[in-house]
Amino acid sequence: MIVIFLSVVLVLIILVNWFKLINESNKISARGPFPLPILGNAHLFMVDASEFLNLIYKFSIKYGDAFRVHFFSRPHVIVNHPKYAEPILSSNELLTKGQSYRFLDSWLGQGLLTSTGNRWRTHRKFLTPAFHFNILQNFLPAFCKNQRILTEKLRKRADGKPINLFPLVALAALDNVIESIMGVSLDVQKNEESDYVQSTDMMANIVSSRVQIPFLAPNMVFNMLPLKKQQDKALEILHGQTRKVIQMRRDELNKANITSLATHSDIGIKNKYAFLDLLLLSEINGEKIDEESVREEVDTFMFEGHDTTTSGIVYTLFVLSKHRDVQEKIYEELKTIYGDNMDRDPTYQELQQMKYLELVLKESMRLYPPVPLIERLMVKDCDVGGLKLVKGTSVLINILQIQRHPELYENPLELRPERFEVPLSSPFNWIAFSAGPRNCIGQKFAMMELKIAISEIVKNFIILPSGIEPKSTAVLVLKSQNGVHVKLRPRN
């Protein structure tokens, strides 16, 4: 009897919550699949990671440029057109990131990627000078040095066989960001088995798993699994390395009696610790930033400046492998810039002269944006582009589909770098670095790194198609389940 009673109560609770979900769903003026009790539409997304992007594309064909789904009881709206994305991205109120980003909290805390409100505004303001071109020029020698190491590793593999670019480029990108953000060199390209490299990969994989698999999302479940112990071990190594570098630089500043940016305003411009010095010497309301907040910002830029740049480089090389004519145009531009000495490193000014290469990079990132989806939490009821959204709804802005939308681009799946020779009808038609107040703070940093990598590889190799199509996945960063492959042939 008790069992029957409890079963009836359980069914009633499920039904009440289901009807509540349907009622809330009807307040959102977007169509979508009908939600089931408990699951919502989560069962529809239990697909292989490489099928996720195709699945939401199929939903957009069926339901339009804005459609609604429920992951369990939480409403999500996925938008594929700038008329919906622009009001959200340009808003100074809708700045809160969505629920997916909470899986980064244990690693990044309240760094610039995950924070919101006054904390985000304050840190964004004082960190922006760290990416001024006067400071970016200081990173050029390190970027060139690390690219030369990558080029030599690629040369050893340039035998006409397919090369999976992702792991090789990822190590070079990690070397770049460690040297520029932390101001130290770990030489991870020469030490692929280092604890730091392994821990970075481990954390990226764990976060990806929690985003992909709904049942790993609740902390109550995750904390009981072996993954939690693996995460704790990785974080001990990652946070330990960051704190070690921070303390080392703090000791150096104290020894030199440097205590304030007010009295040493050019310190970041004249040395390789620009980013770290800004964090250690800046003041908020008359007080220095606490140790843990410094660590969170350093780790945030380690994460953001690593995988995203890798994705941009490898997908550009993949695209170029299918367009020999575009490669040759890049090569001809480089010949006019470098003159007779093609073996030397570029200057910062010469990177700015690589106009055609920049068009190619923009077009490549239009087709394969390094961050294909971004998520914002609606903190109030609002209307965006005629779409009614209720407070608590997570909006997924589908950058990949926006930048391939046939209303915005003629023959959108074709590579046409010349598209960017004239201004776009709206700056929100191309949002590879996001847009609005929360756009990517490091986009000039990224473009510099991308130009160095692609120009150096085109100078040295002819890039050929491998015959292997990437199975792209969209978990925070655009990656490929089976790698991103090309063939290389030495140019000379």
Image: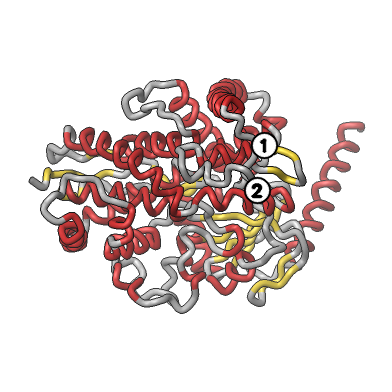
Q: Image quarter for residue 28?
A: bottom right
Q: Residue furthest left?
A: 492
Q: What amino acid is found at the position of numbered circle 1 in the picture? A: Ser
Residue at 49% over, 75% down: 426
Label 2 element class? helix
Q: What amino acid is found at the position of numbered circle 2 in the picture? A: His
Q: Residues within 10 Å of mark 1 (few under 14, many from 20)?
A: some
What color scheme is it?
secondary structure
Q: Give the side of residue 104 with respect to residue 350, left or right.
A: right
Above or below: residue 238 compared with residue 426: above
Residue at 60% over, 34% down: 258
Q: Which residue is mark 2?
A: 123
Residue sitting nearer the eye, 387 or 321: 321
Residue at 61% over, 61% down: 437
Residue sitting nearer the eye, 21 or 402: 402
How many numbered markers are drawn? 2
Q: Which mark is residue 293?
A: 1
Is disc 2 in contact with disc 1, using a CB cutoff of under 8 Å?
yes
Above or below: residue 287 compared with residue 392: above
Residue at 71% over, 38% down: 288
Label 1 element class? helix
Q: Give the side of residue 322 with respect to residue 302, left or right.
A: left
Q: Which mark is residue 108?
A: none
Q: Give the side of residue 412 with respect to residue 42, left or right.
A: left
Residue 389, given in percent of the width and then of the height, sits at 71, 66
Q: Residues within 10 Å of mark 2 (few under 14, many from 20)?
A: some
